[in-house]
Amino acid sequence: MKTIEVANIDSSTGGGAIRAYKILLYRAKTGVECQSLLLGYNSQTLRESRERCPPIGFALPSKILTLLPLPHSMKSALLPLKLIFYFKRYGKIDADIVISHDETINSLRLSANLAETLGSKSLAILQLPPIYGNKSRLDNIMEAVQTFNYLLTTPKLDVRDIPWIMYMRSIHRPWNEAFYEVVDYYLKRFDMLLAVSPSIPLEMGENWSSRVLSLRPGYGFDENELSLLRDLKSRRVHSKPIAVFPARLEVRKGLSDLVLATGLIVRERRDFKLLVMGRGRDDIVRRFMSIVSRFNLKDNIIMMGYVPRYESFLLRREAKLMLYPSHIDSYSYSVAESLLMGVPVIAYDIPALKLNFGGVDGLYLVRELDIEALAQKVLELLEARDISVGEPKVKLYDEVALEEKIILDKIAEKI
């Protein structure tokens, strides 16, 4: 069986890229002749993927077009990618199945078009809900976005943010509705949709739940990673009032919630520190730090930037807790890693966390958007001495790759 896998494997951009990268490395072990078309990468992931799932080329946005003052989702929908193929090296390109490794419009569009051009079957792997069928969930996400924008204008607005605010107030919601129609069009062109978490079809709504197959879960770990995380738990120290937020800096990940909750916490614990470890778009990071500064929290919210995975483990195991008020997720690497290291997690009761980690000791879920409950739970854990933290259900990537191979075989049988 031959596959062409459209993927972003830049592991610094989040759990979805880490998963795609790992699956490409394990694909060859299942007997699949794998080639990749990369939307993103770094030097390490590119070097290692060349040996097991070599790239036939890259699909990158034009540098000039990326400078246009348009929202990221709008540029993705309207602006085509620049394709660079290694035709001289690979000659004729063919595949039994073309696989999109995420639900972004760039990946879906490129994969669907490539599959139709080659006459191949197609599979889309969904790492987040591309569409939200539950109105209350969508309203909560939109409220988080609007809260971030409100904080950005208090007490004064940076002139650089005027286009962003105008877009968010007047265009964002209708654009999202139109964007959903575009995503719907591309999803329907795939032979199969595979979700990495059972929460994804649930959040997409009844119209999609019967059409999306779910892995439970579709994320995994290497054996050495699991051993390391469990070893760190056995040597864990947590004497300081420090919390960590080890996730991508994205508004829907709860950036405004972090600021508001920290503002409440420091009223009682001035020594509280929140280490923010993750990468985000430059404009989002600048706006987040501007809000932090306006709330006089620069001494409490410490921006670490991207921290390599191993180094982040060492920092996180020393924290008292992980604060994770995200409004979107599927199977969170950050939550799983923290629990495996014995670090308790405080988060919102979104479907992804309830379905994948519900019932695990050490995971404390509060009602979504309840900032006061979030802050109160942090204060309680800061004072607690012995906190029981259980181990979540985890898989090895060998298992996940084998499960996907069974699904690929079923798709191939229809050829």
Image (spheres, rainbow, N blue to C red):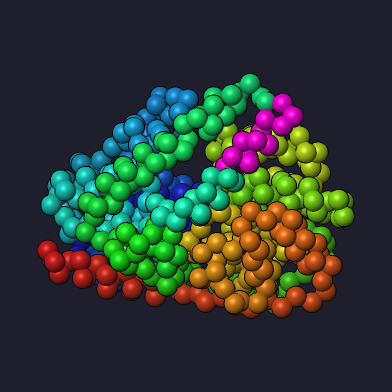
Residue 341 horizontal side relative to residue 271, left or right: left
- Is residue 244 visible to the viewer in this orientation of the structure? no
Q: Quadrant of residue 387?
A: bottom right
- Depicted 215 relative to depicted 174: above or below: below
Q: Is residue 400 left or right of residue 167?
A: left
Q: Residue furthest top?
A: 159
Q: Quadrant of the N terminus?
A: bottom left
Magenta residue span: 145-156
Q: Is residue 152 magenta?
A: yes
Q: Residue at x 66, y 63 (%)?
A: 366
Q: Residue at x 67, y 73 (%)?
A: 362
Can I make out residue 135 in this image? Answer: yes
In the displayed structure, 243 sits above or below 385; it is: above
- Please state the total of marks drawn on the protein image: 0
Q: Which quadrant of the view contains residue 51?
A: bottom left
Is 403 a magenta residue? no
Please state which of residues 261 and 133 is positioned toward the viewer in this rendering: 133
Q: Residue at x 28, y 63 (%)?
A: 211
Q: Residue furthest front?
A: 135
**Main SS category, magenta section:** helix
Q: Is residue 144 above or below residue 323?
A: above
Q: Residue 86 at x, y = what percent?
A: 25, 42
Residue 108 position in % (x across, y down): 31, 48
| Quadrant of the rendering where the C terminus is positioned | bottom left
Q: Residue at the spot x=63%, y=40% of the render?
A: 148
Q: Position of residue 139 (x, y in %)?
A: 52, 49
